[in-house]
Amino acid sequence: MLVLLEHIFLGIVQGLTEFLPISSTGHLVLFRMLFDMQEAGLLFDTMLHFGTLIAVVIVFWSEVRHVLLNPTGKLARLLFVGTIPTAAIGLLFEDFFEEISRTGLTIGWEFLATGAILWAVESMRRGTRTFEQITYADALIIGTLQGAAILPAISRSGLTIAGSLMRGIARADAARFSFLLSLPAILGASGLQTVKLIKTPLETIDLIPMIVGTGFAAIAGYVAIRWMLKIISNGSMKGFAVYVWILGAVILAMQFMGH
């Protein structure tokens, strides 16, 4: 029962924090260390990504269907261009960032940086460029920021939405492009993890907790996307900035005290 509850909890954390601008990896690293949770392993990480992938596909099914039916259309090309720097950064620095994520030593500072980015972009003048006006230069810059979010407590959604807003893209369209750009990134990460799984001998696997956790990740991801779209359209991300500032400060204080 404890294992099942851990998988459900991690699934909810993954689903919510993948799309809210507060960093999914940072929260997973933090909770696993804070509550001394058993390491779920690479297979479960892959399935959690699959859960969040399902959430994006459901919410943006019309856009996903358009890309599948028009693989050489503008949207498909924009996602391809945006994915190039993300993939390059991930492949070149994979081992380095995995070590940072494993130790968790820098996540306090990274949460503070995420908060600063969110606060700064909310203080800027709002853009008016529509989704249809997104350019390949926009996609390249936003994709580079997505790659930089490989640091465990730098929020992927926060950085890509911030990048879109800095490029003058309207808020709702900025969030929409950010979430769509996450699709190839999540697919790529899942693919790399699958390759590692094939090369790694598997121990006994309890599939039920993993499947349940993946389902909760999909549900939480769906809720987070819908919520975030409303916040971006009608609200402000400064509340998230304050949250990650407090979280980062607490983590740094705990580290300073030797925890």
Image (cartoon, grey):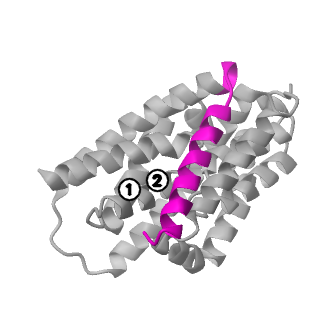
The residue shown at (38%, 39%) is 218
Chief SS of the magenta region? helix
Total number of numbered discs in the rendering:
2
Q: Amino acid at mark 2?
A: His
Q: Nearer the viewer, residue 65 or 194?
A: 194
Q: Nearer the viewer, residue 174 or 135?
A: 174
Specify whether 41 is left or right of 189. left
Q: Residue furthest front?
A: 257
Q: Position of residue 108 (x, y in %)?
A: 57, 60
What range of the chain is rendered magenta?
232-259
Instruction: Tell me, yes or no, whether the highlighted magenta stretch contains residue 237.
Output: yes
Q: Position of residue 153 (x, y in %)?
A: 57, 57
Instruction: Identify whether 76 is placed above or below 80.
Output: above
Q: Nearer the viewer, residue 102 or 79?
A: 102
Provide the residue designation for mark 2.
27
> In what element is the residue under mark 1?
helix
Q: Position of residue 12 (x, y in %)?
A: 36, 42
Instruction: Identify whether 117 is placed above or below 192.
Output: above
> In what element is the residue under mark 2?
helix
Q: Quadrant of the C terminus?
A: bottom left
Q: Amino acid at mark 1?
A: Phe
Provide the residue designation for mark 1.
31
